[in-house]
Amino acid sequence: MKKETRILHAGRNPKDNFGIVNPPVYHASTVTFPSVDAMHKAGQNPTEGIYYGRMATPTSQALEEAVASLEGADRAIAVQSGLAAITGAILPFVKTGDHILVTDSAYFPTKKFCDTVLKGFGVETTYYDPMIGSGISALIQDNTKIVFTEAPGSLTFEVQDIPAIAKAAHDRDVLVIIDNTWAAGYFFNAFENGCDISVQAATKYIGGHSDVMLGTIALHDDLYKKVKTYVYGMGYCAAPDDCYLAQRGIRTLPARLAIHQDNAIKMANWLKERPEVTRILHPAFEDCPGHEIWKRDFSGACGLFSIVLDEKYTDSAVAAMLDGMELFPMGYSWGGYESLIIPFNPQGARQVTAWPDKGPCLRIHAGQENIEDLLADLEKGFARLNKA
């Protein structure tokens, strides 16, 4: 079956639930057993079945089955946030004295985790140019355990050559993890392109309505038990109501992404013609580093991209533009039905790559509003920008 069909049906078993289409929500801590023998047998393999509420419930398992189907993985693990998915994917595979490689364009909390928690554990992080491709081999040390990728990168949207990186890493028996949130596990198949683990902030497009905190770790059977045992031991678990909302969100993911993609492409094309804008950072546009890689490896684009404004605009002028936006509130998440916008400066967030642009940057999430209304709001914003 095609992906669109699979994610509509994966994780749902109406025959087991009185014919009810959607799986019920299980609020559970204690799980009881009918006998001592049954309790002992369950304890011998607690990562399977229903053993304790923090380990799994039918609600979390239904979501995990749907996410695994979406990503093309054997299994998935639901945790309490996107950052928990990232840390839960990294920590099982490193110990004191180990080394990992992380793209310089990674989500800022990922880098913060590496620079504080992992450093405190005695794990060294080296940041690398996101466009390094097969050149990553020169950075792999004897103690390197993980290459962490993110395609496209947060804020600046460089598209990494994941197959080239994965081949170089696997030649040295190094694990490859990708933050696949931008593609929602839908526009990019991490496993067909060489990744070992794919993580997402399901808070974003899987949830789709700005009302859940959730992360997912998709992986194959050979890594599942190790990661599941570790995150269980760390106390990670996903809330049942969030799992239910994410199940509901994943069923409409293809339809919602189509609207986000269409609005973002139209918006970016409109912005490209604006005199205030010097560069479009959207993987579908030639200005974006890795555009050709995106055309080769991705099947589409979501609603999130950035623009660079002319360097003549001051911070106060940008504030005048953004403070008056009606349909683009400022907020740090994305992936919900609504449009969003934030200003950012990538220069202070880079360790090894220099940012070439001097002008202010804006990250935009194109929501599901009518595109004419969104463009009219941006038009008014540019008027304020130029007047300030």
Image: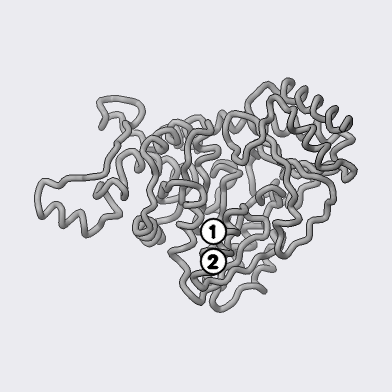
Q: Which mark is residue 49?
A: none
Image coords of residue 353 (percent x, y): 75, 62
Q: Which residue is most to the bottom?
A: 142
Residue 42 position (above or below residue 93): above
Disc 1 marks which amino acid? Ile
| Residue at disc 1, secondary structure | strand
Decide if residue 232 is on the left or right side of residue 344.
Answer: left
Residue 117 x, y percent position in the rendering: 51, 64
Query: In the rendered view, does 92 fall on the left or right side of 327?
Result: left
Amino acid at dot 2: Ile
How far is disc 1 from disc 2 in space, using C-alphas?
A: 7 Å
In this figure, which residue is indicated by the disc labeled 1? 177
Please tell me which residue is depicted at 67% across the width and 60% down the height of the picture.
104
Q: Which residue sits at x=64%, y=31%?
A: 260
- The count of marks equals 2
Contact, mark 1 vs mark 2 (Cβ under 8 Å): yes
> Is residue 5 found left or right of 204 in the rendered image?
left
Q: What percent of the width, then of the height, locates residue 157?
A: 70, 48
In front of the other: 331 or 289: 331
Identified at 90% across, 43% down, the residue is 312
The answer to which of marks 1 and 2 sits earlier in the sequence is 2
Residue 378 is situated, as x and y percent measured from the top left of the image, at 77, 28
- Seen at 46% across and 51% down, the residue is 217
* Res. 146 mark: 2
Which quadrant holds the C terminus? top right
In the depicted structure, whether residue 180 falls above or below residue 341: below
